[in-house]
Image: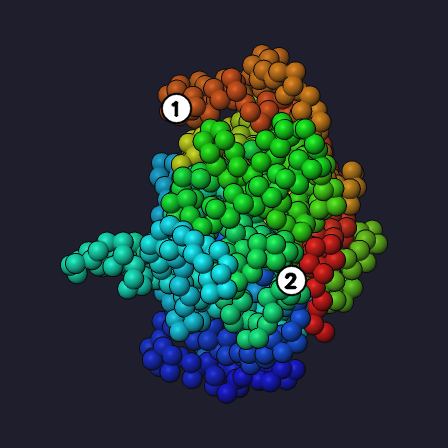
Amino acid sequence: LATAPVGAPPFSVDGFVKEFIHELNTNQGVALSRSSVNDQYLALASTVKNYLMARWLETGRKTRDAKVKAVGYLSAEYLLGRQLGNALLATDLNDIAKKGLELCGLDLVTLRNQEVEPGLGNGGLGRLAACFIDSLATMDVPCIGYGIRYEYGIFRQTFVDGRQVEQPDTWLALGSPWEFPHPEASVQVNFGGRTETYTDADGTERTRWVPEWNVLGVPYNYMVPGYLNGRVNTLRLWSAQATKAFDLAIFNAGDYAQAVRAQTFAENISKVLYPEDSTPQGKELRLQQQYFFVACSLRDFIENELEDDFDLHDLDQRIIFQLNDTHPVIAVPELMRILMDEKGFSWDEAWEVTSKCFAYTCHTLLPEALEVWSTDLLGRLLPRHLEIIYAINEQFLAEVREAYPGDELRARRMSIIAEFPERGVRMAYLSTYAATKVNGVAALHSQLLRDKVLPDFSELWPDKFTNVTNGVTPRRFVKMANPKLSELINDTIGAGWVTDLERLKELEPFAEDPEFRERFAEAKAWNKRRLTQVLRNRDGIDLPDGHLLDVMVKRLHEYKRQSLKLLHIVSLYEQVLSGKLTVDQVTPRTVVFGAKAAPGYKMAKDTIHLINKVAEVVNADPKLEGRLKVAFPANYNVTLAEKLIPAADLSEQISLAGMEASGTGNMKCALNGALTIGTDDGANVEIRELVGDKHFFLFGMSEPEVADLGAKGYSPGAYYEGNAQLKAAIDLILSGHFSGGDQHLFDSVVYNLLHSDRFMALADFQSYVDAQARVEERYADRDAWTRSAILNVARTGFFSSDRSMRDYIQRIWHTQPML
Ligand code: 26M
């Protein structure tokens, strides 16, 4: 069979065909001649999976035997993207599969397009987790990713009359060839009930939790193949299932229908991903999800990854749990509970261990995005954990009072328990206290985290805080997504860059080589042609030839300021309408938006509506002679990103300074040769530093300027009144021009800008428009543009997630690669 031993050369085309047909016949139960594309895709996936199997089993055995320290990445989200392409790349089976399928009369691209991506995340945070586990596997670092197997991932976005309408994401409907369920290894998770004290056999006073109901966590394993290195790590996602005890206790199930309803209730826990990527809602089910996957994961690691006789006092020598934001921080009281209530540790012994096993990554600065769970809810769902959190807080406040005697105000400020607006647990404070290290995700963000979000904590423990700038995997986002550029890079500097991205530096001198520039520009043109086909087939959108491709792809959020991009478009259009610009003065440009709005976020949804209506009118107006187009393909996801980003000329990173923790789309765009127009925010700061001012279009207020303006009192109306170009653009929207004469359809968006504008879009408008003029000037000199684009690629190797992982290893985890 195809389970080639580690290190063996990839099997032959003949071997592949045999295995593929075997899988088609035995797994799908069909003959080639009668098989559907889905059958063929599933058989191909199985073939690749089988090929990886021996390496996976070997990796697990080797790692357990070596008894080395591993990373437990705890994340409520993994935005994985399609698996097949990545698995073919990691195994170097692309050519063999392509040729083998051709012999069968099949087309690899068609089969790859059959895959529905697992969208088990909202955006940046979930995609970061996916990049990190890819890098760890590639770098031979032992890691288990733990998370939730949502039955429905991020919603499928559709537009109806320009408005967002959400559809369920049925990613499992056509089969799920990449997962391995292990019902026999299910874990029980308890909820509710009460706690009681008792005296144990040694006469020690102890507490135990008497829960009221429970569910089962069924593990589903996924392979995480390293790139061409034979390592295959594991991603373990948990699915909730009802237990017998559940329906008895909760519903006193007397009748059958009631019992079945009870099952449904339990299984709701892993049913659907919450689609908010900020402003947590404090929903009970969300807290159940968090505890559910964390409880399963700790149990799994302790029971299944450690030797039976392992002394848990040494737990920190075998694991570091990385908390991907505060979502999994309930793991802290859970580990305390396990050690004290189940393993007989004293409080001090348990804290000694627990306080060494966690590190915390913060992904935001928005105050409303910081999780606070009401103690009411926590006490009802997890009474024992709430007790432990109170005790942690007492111990913590004692430390604070000792460090600052008499400073009671400070103690209250720092308390893990908030008293207003209701009593609640500040999860970021709990995470910060419990973690060995706390990190932000870009240099500026880490600084602001210390100075603005957690100043008291960083004053008390300056060494606890560190920065790890985010990164993206070059395997998926360059090698796989941009084959033409990859080929050019290979031809120029060899193939080593894929796992050593700083080597892109060697491309720098070639910016001056006309032949290289020509090939580089041709790769970009090829990517645009490919995108044109994708958007035609997927969305019925026509991309014009020869346009500057201006790309803004990210979640829709006020702080990201899609509205600012929109005002720029409307302004260009208005200037043509009013004769301030002649059409031939407009640089041919297509703006592509990709953005999902949280379903309950009204302003974000209204903004989507406005963008779509502006697009309709602009795209249809003959006065523009086709020189300005707006494309808004629905349902932006990882699959579309892989086609869109390599085609981008201009990358829009225009958040209000101090608001975007890092951004990672900015890195993907730069690495694919797009130039950035951006504020001094998040990782933009570092991108600009690396590529140089000349090759980056900076605009807008800096973070300190934003703070000053906010303190002075910001009135957007003054910018509207004081800037004729801005006023004309806004007035055009208010006139009903984009709403069939309805002068009030977009009042919510426009009046929010005019009267509140929390993210100061109007204040940065002129600076933005000026920067866009510099963009057009550079683009007019196509050679100069291409030089800048090449230098963006050559100078951004720093943003490989391999480098992020090295930083985590050195500054936070202190683990070793297994070489
Ligand atoms: C919380 C509670 C309930 C439901 C959902 C959430 C939630 C989910 C995701 C809250 C925040 C979530 O993600 C935040 C996020 O994606 N932050 C982004 O993280 C990226 C990776 O570090 C950064 O690059 C982005 O700047 C940052 O916005």
Q: Look at the numbered disc 2 and give the secondary structure of its residue.
A: helix
Label 1: which residue? 745
Q: Give 455 or 624, whichever is nearer the viewer.
A: 455
Horizontal side of 46 relative to 428 (left or right) equals left
Ligand 1 location (quadrant): top right
Q: In the rendering, which numbered label is found on residue 302? A: none
Task: Give the CA distance from mark 2 to mark 1.
Answer: 58 Å
Ranked by sequence position, the earlier of labels 2 and 1 is 2
Give the residue type at disc 2. Asp
Horizontal side of 626 relative to 447 (left or right) equals left
Measured as percent of width and height from the top left, residue 237 is found at 47, 62
Measured as percent of width and height from the top left, residue 574 is found at 54, 23
- Are the residues flagged by discs 2 and 1 in contact, CB closer than 8 Å? no
Measured as percent of width and height from the top left, residue 429 is found at 59, 41
Location of residue 464 with respect to 353 vertically, above or below? above
Give the residue type at disc 1. Leu
Label 2: which residue? 316
Q: Give 309 or 524, whichever is nearer the viewer.
A: 309
